[in-house]
Image (cartoon, coloured by chain):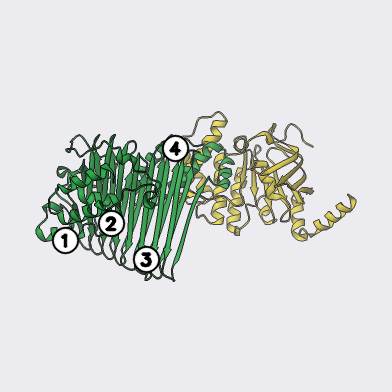
Amino acid sequence: MSEWLESAISRGQKIDDWLTPKRTRALELLSTTQWPTRKTEAWRYTPLRAIQNTKATEVEATSDLTPLAIADLAAIELVFKNGKLDKSLLASNLPDGLTISLGSELAAQQQTQAVADFSEVKPDRHLFGLVNDALAQDVVIVNVEAGVKIEQPLRISALLSQGAESHTRVQITLGEGAELAVIEDVQAQGDTLNTAFVEYFVSPKAHLEHYRFALQTGSNVSVGGCHFNMLDHSTMHSTIVAFGSDLSRLDTDIIHSGEFVDAKLNAIYLLDHNELFDLHATVEHAMPNGTTEENVRCIVGGKAKAVFNGRIHIHRDAQKTLAELNNRNLLVSKTAEINTKPELEIYADDVRCAHGATSAEVDKQALYYLQTRGISRAQANIILNFGFINELIDLMPNEVLAEWIRPIIRQRFSSMKVN
Amino acid sequence: MSDNKSLLTIKDVYASIEEKQIIKGFNLDIKPGEVHAIMGPNGAGKSTMGYVLSGRDGYEVDSGTITFNGKDLLEMEVEERAAAGLFLAFQYPVEIPGVSNLEFLKASVDAIREANGEESITSSELLKQAKAACKQVNLPLAFLKRGVNEGFSGGEKKRNELMQMLLLKPKLCILDETDSGLDIDALQMVAEGVNSQRSPERSFIVVTHYQRLLDYIKPDFVHVLADGKIVKSGDASLALELESQGYAWLETHKDEESTEG
């Protein structure tokens, strides 16, 4: 076991609060967990040195942190500063049908429910999910009443100052037929460590629009997760945009717990320098008639490393499942690295599934076409590479967010050396 | 037959793809303002000639010369040829998802302007010109925002090619079977677009399998291409002749030729 994990366990053991039953359980699991090495499949390409060497520690909240502005976006802001929710930034007049509370402040009955829900969607196999179980300061509980459509997106920002460690936790429940858009983002300065986990409970016929922006770079260490429990006829559309850092890892779990669930997941990575980003995306088709469409696209330059593991598990009873997983990667430097592993596990016999992973250069025909229009080969290469990720930005349902992220991605892309 | 007034002079060109010779002694001289139709059966090398002129990778010129506007075309990169005023309207325009038509047009217009020592176009000016061009070829404005040719029908792709031609104002346009897959209305529209661009400075090579398009775009010259070279040239009446006789006579011609040779 690593010193870092030992310290996390001992810190967790000192916490005594409403979540203690769940924390104790997590600590027990952690104490029997092997610290991952290169031989641990889930961490094979993602070394944890950066965590072992981190100087980040739990510090008091500082007030000079403000969430990065997103132009033209009117959102309901949920701001964590160094792991602690800043209640002063929470709007006092929330839209009808939406409630946001701290788990520690809930009335007894609701608190019992919150404890019951805690870690119900997030699988135990996520080591840092267990760390988050043990160390999260509190749990933010978000509820959207049945049938209510919340017009403004909910934005959950984790802000970290130099040297800070942050463990944030949110549980979001969408009632039957409810609609909500959630934006998760992280902003970190310098040496920082954060685990940010969100669990989603999506009731029948509800619709969740989801974004996770992992744009933190440099010496930040981030390990987090988004976990979705989907009931009958519910739908979700998720977009992940990531740059890399010393260590940036995201685990997503989409669980088809009801029939006729429709899930879409699009992920874009743009990595440069010595950055690492690792997405482990798991989809569990536990029930019949579900559809999943997953598109993951990476552009990796410099000496950066991209890791993608896309597992789709179709259980024996999940007949009539339709699942597609597409992973396309572009290497723009000879020293960049991509490790990709699509995994389909199919135990039902009446399903349609497709998966593919390619590491490719740009399409030669398209390159020629652009050149016949006067565009140099070098610039055509840039246009085509950008187009390759822009396709997924075009699919973002929220146009304000798409227009915000597009120039950020363009900027990052143009600073990468394409050769 | 060429003189210093020629826009394009192709002399005795032999060209191959993957070491298979497709073009075998091609000669053609085009003066500014002329419209030349190149007709011929499938496999004669019609599209190949367009690719050779545009400089596509893999299309090797084994011998011969091509002079464009006084310069050695074969020495130029694909994009340099475009900047010099050569435009190829593709038979099968390429779909490029993620790159919007407007973005593509701006990059293209700017690249050609830059190569000619002009300042780049402002976004608003480009938009104005692109809108006018869309209107002229009857392409909905929404297509400017869509990915280049992405999900366009065959006719829409051809109109998009024409729209680019209107914006780029080339000296020589090669229309590679622009009529294929078009119904009669779309065909007329394409022809009108082309006719509107005819001028004493601009020349056209209209590559087509059928005479139909030439009812609307009146050529000054018609050439019949068979087995990699022009076997017969004439005026517009040659197209009508081909229409009634088909290309079967070429086989006879070929036989005669091989007997002679």
Going by the numbered disc 1, the residue's amino acid type is: Gln
Q: Name the residue located 45 percent from the left edge and 66 percent from the top edge.
A: A352
Which chain is green in the picture? A
Query: Front-most of B258 and A109?
Result: A109
Cα separation between marks 2 and 1: 19 Å
Cα separation between marks 3 and 4: 39 Å
Check disc 2 and report its element: helix, strand or loop.
Answer: loop
| Residue A157 percent location from the top left of the image | 25, 44
Residue at mark 1:
A113
Give the number of the mark in front: 1 or 3.
1
Q: Closer to the N terminus: mark 2 or mark 1? A: 1
Going by the numbered disc 3, the residue's amino acid type is: Gly
Residue at mark 4:
A303
Please report contact status of discs 1 and 3: CB closer than 8 Å, yes or no. no
| Residue A292 percent location from the top left of the image | 39, 61
Going by the numbered disc 2, the residue's amino acid type is: Asp
Check disc 4 and report its element: helix, strand or loop.
Answer: loop
Q: Closer to the N terminus: mark 3 or mark 4? A: 3
Relative to B170, residue A236 above or below: below
Indicate the quadrant containing the N terminus of chain B: top left, top right, bottom left or bottom right.
top right
Residue at mark 3:
A290
